[in-house]
Amino acid sequence: MRLKRLTSVVVAAAAVALGLAACSGGTGEGSGGGTSSNGTVTLQFPSWQATEPGYEQFYKSQVAQFEKSHPNVKINFYEVTYDNFIQQMTTELSANDAPDILPLPVANYAAFASDGFLTNLDSDLQGTDILSSWTPGQKSMQVNGHYYGVLMQAAGYVLYANKQLLAAKHLSVPTTMAQLLADCKALTGNGTYGIAMPTAQDPNIVSYASAFIVGNGQQLLVNNKYNLTDPKVVSDIQQYRELAQYAAPGLITEQARQIYNSGKAAFLLDGIFELPAIASASKSVYASTQMLKMPTPSQVTKLSSSLQIPAGISQQHKQLAWEFIKQVTSPAAQTEFAQDTQTPAPRTSVNAAVASSIPFYSVQQASDNGLNIVPSATWFQSNYGEIGTDFGDAMTKLFTSNASASSALAGLQAQLPAPGSS
Amino acid sequence: MVLSADPRAAQAAKAAQTAPRRRRARRWHWLVLAIALTALLLFPLYWMLVSSVDSISSLFSVNLSLLPNFGDLGSYAEIFRNYQVGLWLVNSLVITAGSAALSIAVAVPAGYSLSRMKIGGDVAGVIMLFTRVIPGTLLVLPFFIMFSRVNLLNTLLSVIIANTSLIVPLAAWIMKGFFDRVPVDIEEAAAIDGCGLWRTFLLVAVPLVKPGIGATGIYAIVLAWSDYLFPKTLLLSPSHWTLSVGAVSLIGEHTVDWNGLMAMGTIGVLPMVLAFAVLEPYLVSGLTAGATVG
Amino acid sequence: MTATQEAAVAAPGRPAPVRPPRRLLPTKRTRFHLLLMTPAILLGLLVLGYPLYLVISASLKDIGILSPSLLASAQTTTQNYKELGSDPSFTQAIRNSVIYTVGSTIPAGVLGLLTALLLNQKFRFRRVFRTLILLPWAVPTVVASFLFLWVLNASYGVLNYILKQLHLINQYIPWLASPHWALVGVIIPTVWKSYPFFCLLILAALQTIPAQLYEAAAVDGAGAWARFRAVTWPGISPAVYLAAVLQALWAFREFEVIYPMTAGGPAGSTQTLAIYLYNEAFQFFHLGYASALGVVTIGICVIFVAIAYPRMRRNLSRS
């Protein structure tokens, strides 16, 4: 009967689809590394940088080297989308299905560490020279006095300038904030803006605010209490607000960067990591881009990414993961890192030798070694997500209204998580 | 216009023309309205197409050009070159087909039983609605844990099962409504004819609810195709990703490939256009009886 | 054709006569039906059982990042629920959720009704338009939200451009950047994604209304609006009601439209309960508190279902 044939066709199609679906999972590798029957150990190494230019080459080459020197070990280095990375890692750690080598954006590092999800690396680190040869930022990786991760990149804040746009208005590169503001004023109009910065609610707004505060010599915390009502801090924020009026309204960070890459803004305040991104987005803008020091009295940096080992994995995997980290932090590998990513390596001693392959080396180095915009208090870092959202609220209000900076900051301070809270 | 020497024929022909012309005029104005409304409602999709081909700098302008620059289809070539778009498309298709098939396979018998067991419409409808009270983000962790325990992580099958669990409640309720309208007498006649329980179900009852099966299929296809939450949580390797996960992967930490993102979005719509075009007859007639379900 | 199929063809659409059960169903039949229902029941448990258990138990503990072992060992406390009472963001989130749900469901319903009425008319190429008008339903939500992120952009968005060209506005509106406009800004793509579902259900219902009813009304001298009230509306109101309930439940829990566009900002103006929940869980790592928020969200939905369902049943049985 026709129906029988139709039914059998449908059933067959469904069976094929389901069969394909089940097969494509292979052995259902899951996220926890395993040991297969012939003794090969597989380490799971998820990363949001797996397809970022520079970082991809570096890590893939490191994985290949490690597999060569450890014949029974395979490292599965795979991409997890940046948008999903923290949620995915939180899910995997919660489900006791942790990867073996865990990179993290340093902003989230403290929360994972203080909740006990990361392996204590104190004794491992003492067996190496890392603590004595690393960029100062590594010291900020202490949570409750212990190390749970190794810094892989400090990211200094710099000022990118589009020389072509400046030359068109006969402006020179600014070295002070006053000059920068004057330049921006001259450049803004007719759909072009002086500077590209996020002006809508964005996790980076707290970084910019902190950069202005710390770069001008003040601190966010004094005696473990918020310092936001200090008149000097208020004027730093006022400076930030003034600069933001020359930026396109309503943009998040990704859009702001795009504005600069399209030549619609003359300046871009961002991390040193942005230079390769400019290069891949627009050759012409890259060609006229100059990297300048931030026009503040001090240079500032924000720790970008680090490598960790989750606590819930087997001893054997921890051992192997640490050996991989040792390899990646060795002088040879660090040299490769600097060359591939065109940013200074955290192992500071290798940088001088490869300075020629790092564009604007002196500027990058100065900002990388700058003051950390994030206070070292663990409770602050653990609450960084919430603090960032509150700062974003306050600053976007200041950007879009005439409210007084001092009252906004006082309100912000009252709203922030209490000092010392977990 | 009829050219005829005979005046009476001409008069008759003219009379015959006026009535349909009036009707045709009315029909034309619906067509015009439809064109206008569709243009308005589909404008965002059109803009997605434009954003995929226009250079980003021309899109950042206070003087936008509303017409795309079709000269440069480079972004499409690029995404196929740089990303596994073909593979992601296949994964999406497999998951969608599998979800639809599994949902139908589970919902049709369930609807039948709900109908024949005289379980009140209350219970079925209430359960159906109650499965819709949990926010998606709260399902992520439990589903991850469950599939991890049975070693199904990173398989397309896990996403199929997850999708099906969301589709089946509504689908079973719809099928129950359809089966309610199939008279029991017919099944009893079949029993007298010598059909067993299975044959009665498969060969007698099911063919009579084909529109309902069509409706369930459409609903399942749309839900499975546009799903992002389960694929992003359960599929770990990029080679297993679906198109929506792959599209979002173009948003990196420092770089965003906006052209590529819009290109992938455009590619993602095309199979649905095809699916809707093929299934459109079933689409509406399928839900006809279902809308008066009780 | 067998006798059974002939009987079906001869009496299409005749509602099944209700037969009082003469005795208990034979065991073999019962087992058969239970077998048919088992897969569906298992899947239902999947979606309801374990997730509900996890959410409720996590809401009663004070934990940051969740893990089953932590869950078992942590102390039970109602601290999370007490905190809800004094949390201004919580009340703001409820307010936002209600405004967002009502503000997106009603326009979607109206738009769905208008498009359904249109697509019910006879005109050339109607089939093509039926396919096209339903298309937004099939666009992955996350792609749609990134698309609208640009369409609604405050400085370069195409919506602003068009509105200005049509002289409807003088200055670009900061759709997603201003606390006053952001909720409207996220409602726009939500309506865009929701109206096809209304259109589909209403169109199907429209097609079951016999043409004679319209003709009879016209003969009685009823104008277009009177015909709509007397003939059309009674025929479609079950569909409208059903679609409204389902869409409202969807909008209340919705996350993928709002989050990529505003993540709940600016200043919490688009932070619905679902977004607040996500932020607390995956941005601030307060999973215990997030679970309490989840329980409240579920509770509100349950109350809504309890109120709406009886009405829905009455409406459906009247048709």
Image (cartoon, coloured by chain):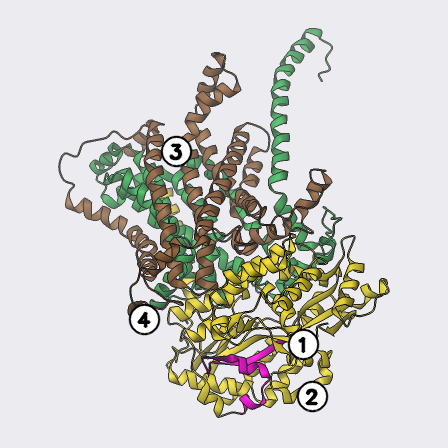
Chain colours: A yellow, B green, C brown
- Quarter of the image for residue C146 reads bottom right
Q: CA distance from mark 1 to mark 4?
A: 44 Å
Indicate the chain on which mark 1 is placed.
A
Q: What's the residue type where badge 2 is placed?
A: Ala
Residue at the spot of label 3: B289
Does the stretch in magenta take in B219?
no
Q: Position of residue A420 (x, y in %)?
A: 45, 71
Give the number of the disc on residue C69: 4
- Mark in front: 4 vs 3: 4
Question: Vertically, is C236 above or below A246?
Answer: above
Badge 1, how many Cα within 10 Å: few under 14, some, many 20+? Answer: many
Q: What's the residue type where badge 4 is placed?
A: Ser
- Quarter of the image for residue A410 reads bottom right
Badge 3, how many Cα within 10 Å: few under 14, some, many 20+? Answer: many
Q: Position of residue A21 (x, y in %)?
A: 43, 61
Indicate the chain on which mark 4 is placed.
C
Residue shown at the point (48%, 37%) measured from the top left: C198
Report the span colored magenta. A129-155
